[in-house]
Image (cartoon, rainbow, N blue to C red):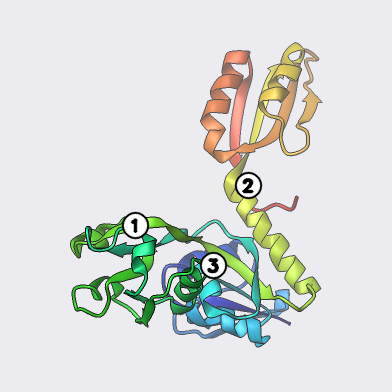
Amino acid sequence: MLRIAVPNKGSLADAAGEMLHEAGYRTRRDPKELIVSDADNDVELFYLRPRDIAVYVGSGTVDAGITGRDLLLDSGSSAAEVMTLGFGRSTFRYAARPGEVSTVADLDGKRVATSYAGLVDKHLADLGIRAQVVRLDGAVETAITLGVADAIADVVETGTTLRQQGLATFGDPILRSEAVLIRREDVSETNGFAVLRRRLTGVITARHYVMLDYDVPAELVEQACRLTPGLESPTVAPLANGTWCAVRSMVPRARTNAIMDELWDLGARAILVTDIAACRL
């Protein structure tokens, strides 16, 4: 049975559960559930703290997990990123009061507060900067105001919280993070894990593409197919009247309306868009 660690709370929890549900796995209905057995798919889901997931995967306690890239790298575990999942994107950056610390080099000899001590330690060491890293479990933005640190390193989304504390980011981002599927580095991929990876890939593809069907005059099929090349090649079938063809192709969801307009201008009609619930490519 494949054991999968899933975030039990936080920004990744709902999106991870939704993705697994779309992939055909049974997920919890009650937030208090810690373990969910899915006998039909030979899978067990373990709902754990997001920060602990990489540790459990790296130790082999569970076979796979969904967590943030930032948490994976901060853990120092032997788990490895297998694929990105397209949600939970964030940027990890340094911040301080303007005029006091303005470059990463200025951190030499200073105190840096963060909830990601392992990640920051490595980043500073790689740059040859000696700074005291102060580990905090939360409320990192107030560390400078309270005199605990001279700068902070934290996840930045809109920057509103930083500005409220009179802070500004500086330097290049330490890391761009998002949700990732992980497994232990030194373990070969099992069939159950291969199925999980394939299913999640199918969910991501289904979210990014739609199925487009349309009718087009036979003499315009070649031009129409250039607008909708699909992943390999469109499906083209002659209609009963012999002068028109029906075309079916996957197109990027973000360009759906623009492509429909281009097809209409070309002469296509009966243009229909259908969501893709799942796929295997």
What's the distance in space between the residues labelled 2 and 3, CA to CA? 28 Å
Residue 27's label in the rendered image is none
Q: Is label 1 or label 2 in front?
A: 1
Q: Name the residue under label 1.
A: 170
Check disc 3 and report its element: helix, strand or loop.
helix
Between 269 and 84, which is closer to the camera in this rendering?
A: 84
In the image, residue 2 above or below residue 69 = below
- Count residues near mark 3 (Cα–Cα under 10 Å), then give few for <14, some for 14-19, many for 20+: many
List x then y, in percent, for residue 108: 37, 70
What's the distance in space between the residues labelled 1 and 2, CA to CA? 42 Å
Q: What residue type is labelled 3?
A: Arg
Between 150 and 136, which is closer to the camera in this rendering?
A: 150
- Count residues near mark 1 (Cα–Cα under 10 Å), then give few for <14, some for 14-19, many for 20+: some
Q: Decide if residue 180 is on the left or right side of residue 163.
A: right
Q: Mark 3 points at which residue?
A: 69
Q: Residue at x 50, y 84 (%)?
A: 33
List x then y, in percent, for residue 142: 23, 73
Q: Mark 2 points at which residue?
A: 276
Check disc 2 and report its element: helix, strand or loop.
loop
